Image (cartoon, grey):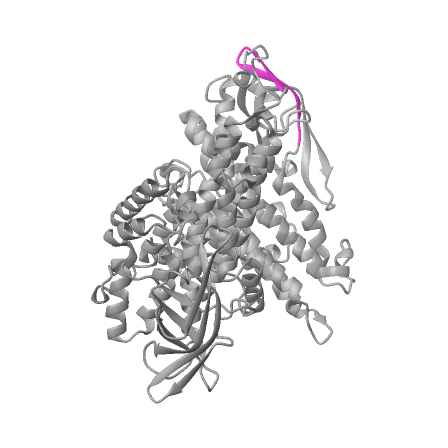
Amino acid sequence: MRLQLSPEDQSFREEMRTFFTREFPESIRDAVKAHRELTRDQIVESQRVLNKAGLAVPHWPVEYGGHDWTPLQRHIWHEEMQAAYVPAPLAFNTSMVGPVIAAFGTQEQKDRFLPATANLDIWWCQGFSEPEAGSDLASLRTSAVREGDEFVVNGQKTWTTLGQHADWIFCLVRTDPHAVKKQRGISFLLFPMDSPGVTLRPIELLDGGHEVNEVFFEDVRVPAENLVGEENRGWDYAKFLLGNERVGVAPVGHVKRLVAEAKRHAGEITVGDSTLLADPLLAARIAELENDLLSLELTALRVVANSADGKPHPASSVLKLRGTELQQAATELLVDVAGPDSLASFATEGSDVPEWARVVTPQYLNFRKASIYGGSNEVQRTIIAGTILGL
Amino acid sequence: MDFSYDNEQTALREAVAGLLTKAYGGDERRTVTRSEPGFDEATWGRLAEMGVLGLPFAEADGGMGAGPVEVALVATEMGKVLAPEPFVETVVLAGGLIAALGTETQRTELLTAIAEGTSIVVLAHAEPGLRWSPSAGSVTAEQSGDSWTLTGVKEPVPHGARADSFVVSARTADGATQLFLVGGDAEGLTRTGYRTHDGGRAARVAFAGTPAELLGEAGGDRTADVERALAMARIAYANESVGAMDTALAMTSEYLTTRKQFGVTLNKFQALTFRAADMYVSLELARSIALWATMVADAGGDVVLAADRARLTTSRAGRHIGKEAIQLHGGIGVTAEYKVGHYTSRLTAIDHQLGDGDWALGRLAAGVAGHESVDPLS
């Protein structure tokens, strides 16, 4: 047992920190710091800067831009990125479809899609959830019928995050409606969002933002060469993808930033002769959150330190569950620090309420999503009870 | 950053686990804790033979020259079976103070005796109303020439009736906290022992002009030394409580898969399995922070702060897991015949031994403005 990073990991950490804080565009980091919504161009620029530095897809195979990093080094990369307010590479590209294509795609698909996916020349969106298939994803109904060398797709997807920016969609479709097990009749298809028959309807969220969409398919014709892997094996690829989605989902760096920000503001708010931060109840709440976060970060480190053999550590299921709880607790803390100022949510530039206090409530409301997406926290409890405790 | 045990540590863990499972794998603990001295002298002797009782002491003092990691893994194994032997009390707490402050003669004599299992030494520090202060309260030390006498009451003193000798904290005329050694047969010493709710033993120990020997050299105030020793013990207890939580959850999971109601085993009820899943989350988070605090101690870091952090999280987890373990078992969990409730009782005792979760939180809250965020690697 050893607390310190090895000298190699220490210098790796320094290298990451230096790049993210010195060489990454300041304007984008400032926007993240101020909780401003990033434009499409900023997200693309951000990922291209990372990709140029070889830091967009470290977990991919080396021949497609990945690195032979240890799980701990990947963790350090992710943490330093978050700590420096650098937006993470677009998850749909780098954590979801990229690894699926790299693992199960044809050589042609790899050559065609992987470099463009890493560089965000193609923006991907995810076509998984449907109105009647949320946590029970395998009951999805969007159909794809083979006609010659094409699939004809009909149906509807929902919660399609940033679909309005997307060039392509990776989509789970039902290709065998008669399969005995519903998981066995699903395939994994790729097609452009501007294919005839694709329409997109924005869903406005509680925070007033346009983050997710409904996507409708009406006789969308998809070349059969855009099928990933084998027909009717799409569920296996989706499970592989969701496994990647859950790994590294503990947003430790993000929560740390939020708590540090709450402390900074609380230290500047005067209450009587003192500051809000000196209020014993608030100080205790922050201290407890910091300790909870410390134990989460340490659990994440245990997981990465012990998963070198490729098998996930059992405690990894704790990360999503607890990580999102703490993320939500931190966003709630910021609203409470803002107090009455938090009501000025949609105030415009002329407002005397500081910008940070105007965005905290929409952020809090938006982050209720965290315990729902990526396998809801109830799904995580089911996994823990079933696969770890044997219940 | 490495959370794994090396080969020697793994071997030690297996040996200790083997010894303790043999001693307490069945219903032995109930018999042992119902008769005096509340632990098994033979098991204590076997721990000594294995070198466990001298683990953290320097080889020159009769010890094994090991460190906090070895201590932690022993404490964890003891927690798993609720071994009632006073390992933390004697080796970590009293032994730790003697090792840190004792003169060469004191170290050689007392630490060798502890390591060999021939002497139980405990710290008599708590006083009614003192609430986990690192300073002595109303017990006073009076100097006359080169000799000292103590007057006042210490309570509850763990294993105070059985102890062969004591390390006692007391206030000197100038208000400073000093530490003294007192033999169990010292003049003017009265002890009244009793059972504690977790099957342990404690005592009221009264001093009436009792002759005492200064621990270490004269001078200074020993509050910071006591604080440090208490922190090391808190870290050991954090590991012990993780062991206890581990077993409490394992017993609960086992029970849910075997106990039938409404014609099905209890694990068919999601209301119960979700609560067990939450217990697992608490356990793993507590384990992480207990291991981290152990590594901070091993690396010579800020043990007082690390111990407070471990105390807070393991206190919360211990209460959560202890209470849920009983609830998910149902009525049987509240009986003395069945084991699981004893885990809750022990976790409750550990929680209040050297400072509970809210107490630790108060200390952490006082320092919250002093850092931007917490970095476990620094």
Residue A90 at least partly seen: no
| Nearer to us in this view, B151 or A119 | B151
Q: Is residue A363 left or right of residue A167?
A: right
Q: Quadrant of residue A168?
A: top right
| Residue projecting furthest to the left | B60
| Position of A195 relative to A206 (above/below) | above
| Residue projecting furthest to the bottom | B145
Q: Is residue B209 within the magenta segment?
A: no
Disc tally is 0
| Position of B56 relative to B187 (above/below) | above
Overall secondary structure of the magenta stretch? Answer: strand
| Position of A21 relative to B185 (above/below) | above
Q: Is residue A258 left or right of residue A312?
A: right
| Nearer to us in this view, B101 or A26 | B101
Q: Position of residue B3 (x, y in %)?
A: 36, 49
| Nearer to us in this view, A293 or B8 | B8
Q: Which residues are magenta?
A: A142-158
Q: Position of residue B283 (x, y in %)?
A: 49, 45
Residue drawn at x 71%, y 76% is A273
Residue drawn at x 46%, y 22% is A229
Residue B308 at least partly seen: yes
Q: Position of residue A203 (x, y in %)?
A: 72, 36
| Nearer to us in this view, B282 or B265 | B265
Q: Position of residue A159 (x, y in %)?
A: 66, 34
